[in-house]
Amino acid sequence: MSTALKAAGLEKTFAVGKPLFGPPKGLVRAVRPTTLEVGTGETLGIVGESGCGKSTLARMLVGLLAPSAGTIEIEGEALNRADPAEFGRRIQYVFQDPISSLNPRKTIRQIMEVPLRRLHGMGRPAREQRIREIFDSVNLREEFLDRYPHEFSGGQAQRIGVARALAAAARILVLDEPVSALDVSVQAQVLNLLARLRGEFNLTYLFISHDLAVVEAVSDRIVVLYFGAVVESGPAERVFSTPRHPYTRLLAQSAPVPGRPLTAPEQKDTELPDPLNPPPGCAFANRCPRATDICRQEDPALRPMGGDQFAACHHPHEV
Amino acid sequence: MSAFLKLLFRNRLAGAGAVVLAIIVVLVLLTPVLPLQPPNVTDTADRFLRPFSEGHLLGTDHLGRDLLSRLLWGTRLSLAVGFAAAIVAAVLGAAVGIIAGYFGGRIDNTIMRGIDMLMAFPYILLALAIVAALGPGLMNALIAVAAVNIPFFARNIRGITVGLAGKEFVDAARLAGLGHGRILLFELLPNVVPVIVIAMSTTIGWMILETAGLSFLGLGSQPPQADLGSMLGEARSAMITAPHTSVVPGAMILLIVMSINLLGDGVRDALDPRLKSGALSRPMAATLVERERVPEARGEGLLDIQELQTQFHVGRRIYRAVDGVSLTLEPGESLGIIGESGSGKSVTALSVMGLVASPPGVITGGAARYKGQDLIGAKYPRLRSLRGDRIAYIFQDPLSTLHPLYRVGDQLAEAILSHHSVSKAEAMQRAVGLLEDVRIPNAENRARAYPHELSGGMRQRVGIAMALANEPDIIIADEPTTALDVTVQAQILALLDDLRRDRGLAILFITHDFGVVGQLCDRVAVMYAGRIVEEGPTAEVLDDPAHPYTARLIACVPELGQGRREMAAIPGLPPAVDNLPEGCAFAPRCDKATPACRAGDIPLAGTERRRVRCIHPETDVEAVA
Ligand SMILES: Nc1ncnc2c1ncn2[C@@H]1O[C@H](COP(=O)(O)OP(=O)(O)OP(=O)(O)O)[C@@H](O)[C@H]1O
Ligand code: SF4
Ligand code: SF4
Ligand SMILES: [Mg+2]
């Protein structure tokens, strides 16, 4: 399996409270040095709670945001400048809110034509032909093309979003919470469509979600983010069934499962650390039931745990 | 477009403004071809002729020039300069605003500081300074008036653009290969144009006035050329002896500015999307009730909802959001309502306490009895005394019930004081106790926090504390954990569960998550298109669903621990509730449908314990007992 996407030491720090002149008031490390590798045709699931840096990471991977440090390599080519047009031919983004990702004042045809014209310089007849093919493959009727976004349901709009990503002919899609805004019956329609397209066009997916069950159902591998860093990664079938990192375990125990008795999972505090003033050592220490002194001094590195699983923890759970 | 005109003319004043303005515009457009005397020919023998004099309908001015002719030519010039200034200000202001809003950061900062500096000067002083620097003349007056109005447009448009630039479609356009220039022109501008039009329509009147002001001071049009301002200025010295020379241009200015402003306000209102939905009138305190028949009391349960029907009347359409829902809730029981978006869960919950917005909401049938008393149709003071006291709500967004400008402890104390006569200190003490009850660490300190200083999970706990403030019998929770992270959700659910066990609270829990229902609820009712399609003990419904919809919905939901798998989807979409099919509403998506399913109404049949609305159920609900 060849490598579709490789990110090494990717990092993003935002300056906050910046005055017109002079240095900013503080620095927020939204993504701490992160290394990822995704094979062609693979689906990598990315989970984590709100504010853990999922979307910042995704936006760097598609070139919408310039990383503060680190490198991105797509299909063997280093992309060193955050230029969305340069990235757009290789990697595309499918947004969480399907309606707001479509310009309310444009018809679907106008929206679909942009990537074909700007990224691939196609002429009119070629564009029409291509749009027809794509619409066919995402099960949308051609008559939709001359309508405006507000006329569509969430599920239809999300399929239009996928169609637009396909129009760019990118072989890697970053799916940022693609089904969170959809109803369950429609969610399954979109997930199944994504699975079919992946097989049909040999696509590579980065699937971001906060819904553990959905991520587990669609991914080959999963990485768990906490406070801007990867705390655990491994094969989808192992990460939540045999979590090694206490945070992953907390997540897995918190997911609602019918029939499981309702007890609040073991944790001390629920608050994330202050991003402007992060604690030394492990970021999870204030919530972790296993924390010891070393955890508060030394930031644990990601290390292999056997069975192709990795975790960043001084006292990982045993299998 | 015709809808826009209809909305515009519904506003009488705006209509009148439009008519007056139209007449004036037609007159000045026709001025060159009207049989008028030349406006600038002096005839000192005929100075200060009164109106209705021979050959001079409006009289003459101090040089004996025909006032009617000067008025029309002057109005023509004033309107033209005013419009030109408005267009210049709008174009430049919008360009500056859109650029500042789109790029943000340092560019935005620099531009907006400059704009702030312009705004720091008094309006007319700035205009005067500009004309003083450039020298008097109509063109320079135009430049001055346009310049002082640029900040207004820039700020307005920047505000709108900042909101738009954060939208995902802008990112999508960048990924589709569009550069900044194209995004500004083709993606953002079309969304901003309506705002520019509104801003122009409300300011153009003032710009005409300001131009007139400069001309009045002799800084605008230069003699002998007439515009409204200079006509007034020249008439100033004869104000007492020949008042008509000032009244004529003055009245015209009044007419123009008034008609433009009335029309402008009308345009703004007609373009405002909030008014398009027909929500022109003020909402009522409680939902409108129009029942023909009140069902007999059954004397069951703490809360007994019987055949509740709530509709939305929008224009000629009727949305049957809730269509005959019956539910009972016992003390200490937790009843779940589950269903997809738009199935009527929230409207059911809001109808109980008359919280559905009217218009367009109308409760057209049924009853909701709390301890035997019907709440629907109850007088507003009665509802208000029960709201938050005996029956409390928790919403998805706790910010909707918390006031942003008051400390959470004070708000809790206020909620207690509104239903109980206790001292302030005691109320405050109870407030801190409540925060401890919902397991907020360091409650004493947190009581002094403002809502925005708390995390989402903390805020929702405050929302629950609010609901508990008066020890209610019933809590109606509408998706209270949907916006929260799983780890926080687990804690909130555990908290609600403890509360109902410790205090005998009855909970009506609305959700679209089977996992949540499975953990928290004793019984569950499944809703589809405004009706209950299945009801029963949670474990039985989840393990052995009887309605095809329930069965297939459960199959759609992946469960943690089942590994990678293909999900079973339900094709199609739920029906629109203003156009429900005859018979079973699920029939178009159901693979067991037969002609009988579409023939007539399908009743909710079964036992007290377990009911299903289907003639070919998956299991026999009467057999399982
Ligand atoms: N103010 C309103 N005007 C017109 N129709 C409305 C209004 N509020 C709700 N409706 C309609 O009533 C129906 C039921 O809505 P309701 O909010 O109860 O659904 P829900 O089950 O709570 O959905 P969700 O899961 O999205 O919260 C929907 O068809 C909705 O479009
Ligand atoms: S390093 Fe220590 S504090 Fe961090 S997760 Fe592991 S045990 Fe807990
Ligand atoms: S009544 Fe008929 S159409 Fe409706 S759910 Fe049952 S089998 Fe399907
Ligand atoms: Mg709702």
Image (cartoon, coloured by chain):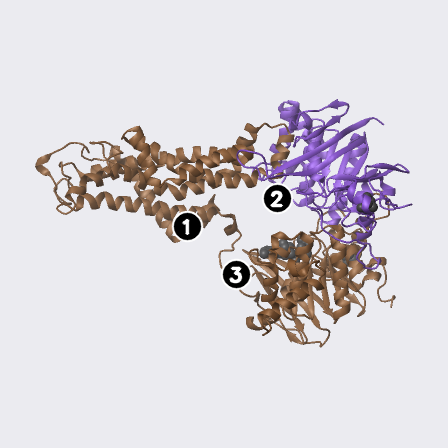
Chain colours: A purple, B brown
Q: Is residue B326 above or below residue B272?
A: below
Tell me, for residue B283, which label it has, or none.
Answer: 3
For mark 3, name the chain.
B
Which of pointers 1 and 3 lies earlier in the amino acid sequence? 1
| Left or right for B163, reference B232 | right
Assign a secondary structure to mark 1: helix
Tell me, for residue A151, which label it has, or none.
Answer: 2
Judge by depth and name the residue closer to the eye, B163 or B460.
B460
The residue carrying pointer 3 sits among few (fewer than 14), some (14 to 19) or many (20 or more) residues within 10 Å by Cα, namely: some
For mark 2, name the chain.
A
Assign a secondary structure to mark 2: helix
What residue is at 51 percent from the left and 35 percent from the top? Answer: B109
For mark 1, name the chain.
B
Q: What is the x, y in percent for residue B6?
A: 45, 49
Tell me, for residue A1, which label it has, or none.
Answer: none
Q: Quadrant of the C terminus of chain B?
A: bottom right
C-alpha span from label 3 to label 2: 27 Å
| Left or right for A256, reference B361 | right
**Is the C-beta of the residue carrying label 2 under 8 Å from the nearest atom of ligand 1?**
no
- Mark 3 or mark 2, whichever is nearer to me: 3
Asked if one can make out residue B417 in the rendered structure from this viewpoint, the answer is yes
Amino acid identity at mark 3: Pro
Tell me, for residue B9, which label it has, or none.
Answer: 1
Judge by depth and name the residue closer to the eye, A102 or A141.
A102
- Decide: marks 2, 1 in contact (CB < 8 A)? no
Q: Are marks 2 and 1 on the same chain?
A: no
Q: In which quarter of the view is residue B497 placed?
A: bottom right
- Mark 1 or mark 3, whichever is nearer to me: 3
